[in-house]
Image (tube, grey):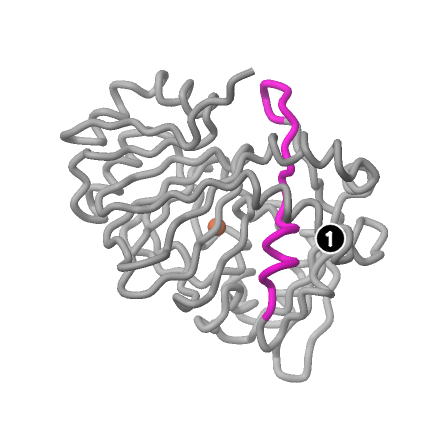
């Protein structure tokens, strides 16, 4: 079977909002086929035009405030926010958006307002291809992750820490102002937790699915394991404590090595040009962010 071009590039000109409205069905068919689309050459000059394009696509948004995302972000327009405020030198490893929580968007729009001088590509990786390879190379790991699910542990600061890729405060993450409210929200979500002496909060998710079957029957490596294992390192977080199987036993470096190797092998870098818009199926494709130098502004908008 020949694999589709990935990401598929749709070149055009003029108003992207009008294009997306007029071609919604074809765009969705192309997205289901490729997993990620790059719209290049259209007239998307600023975040307002990007917001209009997302609106033109016509599906409801998934808001940052409602999410349990770890990343510090800032709203730019009602539907558009900064992708992640982590410093340029920080690599954000492959992940499905918010797959470390029970609440996640189905699709992601990205928009390059300012392309970086060097680096800063968005790596994209087909998760169904990753899973198919892993089933060959690490069948025991796949079986166990599927059977037990996986848990994520993250230590959230009391106040936003923009110096970290997962620096969103527990107050903001949980949309609460007091510890009592935080505990009530965590109880509803099925998390366990432990308060730390510096007002940070160590929270562990319930067992979440590590593999997802999407609507057409394809199975994907839908989780946050690679990003958590490779990237959840800051003054509060130790990646070796970030992920476990559903029974609480650690997922080790040895467990993760095949997944990381296979995903790296299958990754394609999207090198941004100013005005580019990408649409990513969050159930089918993982994304990340390469380190960069110079000014880079890539904005995001999430579909519920
Ligand atoms: Fe992300």
Badge 1: residue crowd in 10 Å (few <14, some 14–19, many ≥20) = many
Left or right: where does residue 59 sit relative to residue 264? left
Residue at 51% from the left image edge and 51% from the top image edge: 67
Q: Residue furthest bottom?
A: 197
Residue span colored magenta: 214-233
Residue at 77% from the left image edge and 42% from the top image edge: 145
Left or right: where does residue 42 sit relative to residue 30? left
Q: Is residue 219 above or below residue 201?
A: above
Q: Is residue 298 above or below residue 16?
A: below
Per the image, is 142 magenta?
Answer: no
Judge by depth and name the residue closer to the eye, 181 or 191: 191
Per the image, is 222 magenta?
Answer: yes
Location of residue 276 in the rendering, given as x and y in whole percent from the top left corner: 26, 41
Location of residue 166 in the rendering, given as x and y in whole percent from the top left corner: 53, 64
Mark 1 CB in 8 Å range of ligand 1?
A: no
Q: Is residue 285 above or below residue 92?
A: above
* Label 1 sits on residue: 151
Judge by depth and name the residue closer to the eye, 53 or 41: 41
């Amino acid at each position: 079977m020949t694999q589709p071009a990935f990401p598929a590039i749709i070149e055009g000109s003029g108003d992207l909002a009008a294009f997306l409205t007029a071609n919604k069905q074809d765009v969705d068919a192309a997205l289901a086929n490729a997993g990620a689309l790059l719209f290049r050459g259209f007239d998307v000059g600023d975040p307002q035009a990007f917001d209009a394009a997302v609106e033109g696509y016509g599906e409801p948004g998934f808001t940052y405030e409602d999410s349990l995302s770890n990343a510090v972000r800032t709203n730019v327009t009602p539907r558009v926010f900064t992708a992640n405020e982590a410093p340029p030198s920080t690599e954000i490893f492959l992940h499905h958006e918010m797959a470390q929580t029970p609440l996640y968007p189905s699709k992601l729009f990205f928009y390059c307002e300012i392309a970086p001088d060097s680096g800063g590509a968005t790596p994209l990786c087909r998760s169904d291809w990753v899973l198919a390879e892993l089933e060959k190379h690490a069948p025991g790991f796949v079986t166990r992750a599927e059977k037990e699910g996986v848990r994520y542990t993250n230590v959230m600061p009391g106040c936003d820490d923009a110096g970290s890729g997962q620096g969103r405060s527990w107050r903001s993450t949980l949309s609460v102002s007091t510890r009592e409210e935080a505990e009530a929200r965590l109880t509803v979500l099925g998390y366990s937790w432990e308060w730390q002496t510096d007002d940070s909060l160590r929270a562990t998710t319930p067992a979440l699915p590590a593999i997802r079957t999407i609507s057409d029957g394809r199975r994907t490596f839908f989780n946050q394991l690679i990003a958590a294992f490779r990237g959840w390192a800051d003054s509060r977080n130790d990646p070796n404590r970030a992920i476990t199987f559903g029974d609480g036993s650690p997922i080790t470096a040895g467990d993760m090595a095949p997944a990381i190797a296979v995903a790296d092998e299958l990754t394609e870098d999207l090198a941004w040009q100013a005005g580019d818009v990408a649409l990513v199926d969050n159930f089918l494709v993982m994304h990340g962010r390469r380190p960069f130098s110079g000014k880079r502004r890539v904005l995001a908008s999430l579909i519920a």
